Image (cartoon, grey):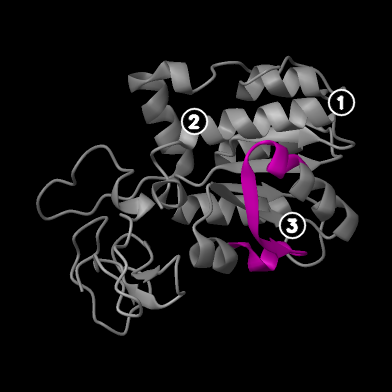
Amino acid sequence: MASAIVVDDSPIMRMQLRNLLAQAGCQVVGEAASGDEVLALYERHRPDLVTLDIVMPGKDGVTAATELLARHPSAAVVMCTSLTTRDKVVACQKAGVSHYLLKPFQPERAVAVFRHVLSRGAGVSAGAAR
Amino acid sequence: MTCPRCDRANADRRRYCGGCGASLEHTCGACDFVNRADDRFCGGCGDGLPELAHARVIAAPAPSGSELRISAADLRALLADIAPEVVPQHELTPGTGAVNQDDLDRLFGGAV
């Protein structure tokens, strides 16, 4: 089964993401409420997917994604945020994120995006090889 | 130890490669024992360790005597050249308005 870590400062949002990821066939193996923990959490679990909120206490999601992808270019990162400004989207795209989902989620669409991103990483990540 | 990504020799106390920044640790998924990145079997439980993702990502070997480090943006550009089907080529339409999920699905691919 594919694995994911969920980074969002809202416990309710983390619960919703756990449910959506489960529908996409993905088990959440780690959670955090701040971008500060992303790199350590990723290197501990080597998940197939990372979901990242942008506005969080401590390190924001764009900075966390940029640092994570600079060190682990194969990481599959899906930004999950309510921010709709073009500069944020462009910054995330330049960082190399795999997708950008807007809150509130459209559940079927979110599940399809997770499946799509996971299918692109199949056979590449350490988690998928376990 | 030798870095699995760039082959640089590193001191054993190092956690990250001095040449490319790759992690030199490999945590066992079964027992959480921290192994060296080049270990093939876990020192804690004996399970076989999967190959690290970062050891398989870079497409081209570094020329002798130099080091290869590639950013996410460079990797994306490289993939766009050699495998454009996996890298959507769409750009956001100009403007200052908010983006919606349709725009984002076109930009990143995988639209429903």
Q: Name the residue beneath numbered marker 1.
A: B98
Classify A40 as above or below A116.
below
Q: Position of residue B51 (x, y in %)?
A: 30, 54
At mark 1, the secondary structure is loop
In this orientation, does residue A10 appear? no
Q: CA distance from mark 3 to mark 2?
A: 26 Å
Marks 2 and 1, how far apart at CA: 28 Å
Q: Is residue A32 magenta?
A: yes
Which residue does the numbered mark 2 point to in the structure image? A120
- The residue wearing badge 3 is A60
Residue A109, label in figure:
none
User: Which stretch appears magenta?
Assistant: A20-38
Q: Amino acid at mark 1?
A: Ala
| Residue A42, quarter of the rendered image | bottom right
Along the viewing direction, whichever of A53 and A108 lies nearer the viewer: A108
Q: Quadrant of residue B45?
A: bottom left
Which is more toward the observer, B48 or B51?
A: B48
Farthest left residue in view: B64
Residues marked 3 and 2, same chain = yes
